[in-house]
Amino acid sequence: MPDTERIVPRAAPARRAGRAALAVCLTVLATAGLAGCYARASAAPSISLSTAFVPQPTAGRTVGYLLIRNSGSRDRLVSARTSAGGRVTFAEPVRSGSAAVHLIPSIPIPADSVVRLNPDGLRLLITGAGRMRGGQDVTLTLRFAHAGPVSVTAQVTNPQTGGSSY
């Protein structure tokens, strides 16, 4: 029995140390798991797009209008493409109220703001796209400097029949 008494006290601290090590490992894993959940939750996109439409092209050219909502820090729209192909550039009026526009390399998106691409202001210029008919949907994919690519479905409208959703 005396040998048993010496072994039991020595085994008990080893068991306690093992349990402590297991508790530390579980705590580290739980913390890492929660941090990962937080990172995924906080990685929600700060840019959202809505109310997009594209008038039916005439002579191979059209424009794109939409709302860009930024709930994060400032960003910049640097490129765009359509599911109908073609080339997409950015334009703004030469002066307020003017129908004349000039091309710009990008569109600034201020922090916590809504930027409207509309007939009186900033817009997408679409040239050389494939066939687009009134009532059809096309996908616009906008690429932002920080947020990356964000897509929205835009309805092709026919201005001759009054089709516009802006």
Image (cartoon, rainbow, N blue to C red):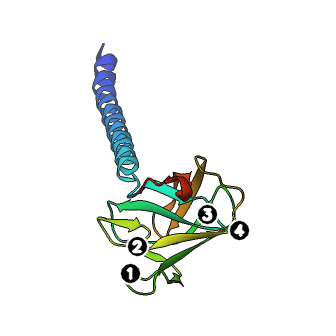
- How crowded pointer 4 is (Cα within 10 Å; few <14, some 14-19, many 20+) is rated as some
At x 32%, y 60%, the residue is: 71
- Quadrant where the N terminus lies? top left
At x 35%, y 62%, the residue is 70
Name above or below for residue 106 compared with residue 133.
below
Q: Residue furthest top?
A: 1
Q: In the displayed structure, would residue 25 be above or below residue 84?
A: above
Q: Pick the residue in front: 29 or 128.
A: 128
User: Is there CB contact under 8 Å for labels 4 and 2?
Assistant: no
Quadrant (top left/top right/bottom left/bottom right) for the C terminus: bottom left
Badge 3 element:
strand
| Residue drawn at 45 percent across, 87 percent down | 94
Residue type, mark 4 in image: Gly
Badge 1 crowding class, 10 Å Cα cut-off, few under 14, some 14 to 19, many 20 or more, is few
Residue 68 screen position, x and y as percent: 40, 62
Q: Quickly name the residue at label 2.
A: 120
Mark 3 and mark 1: Cα distance apart in space:
27 Å
Task: Decide if residue 35 is on the left or right side of residue 88.
Answer: left
Indicate the secondary structure of the residue bearing disc 2.
loop
Residue 97, disc:
1
Sequence-wise, which precedes: disc 2 or disc 3?
3
- Which of marks 3 and 4 precedes in the sequence? 3
Upstream in sequence: badge 3 or badge 1: 3
Mark linked to residue 129: none
Q: Amino acid at mark 2?
A: Asp
Percent of width and height locating residue 6: 30, 24
To which residue does mark 4 refer? 128
Comparing labels 3 and 1, the label whose residue is closer to the camera:
1
Q: Does residue 8 lie above or below 13 as drawn?
A: above
Q: Badge 3 is on which residue?
A: 81
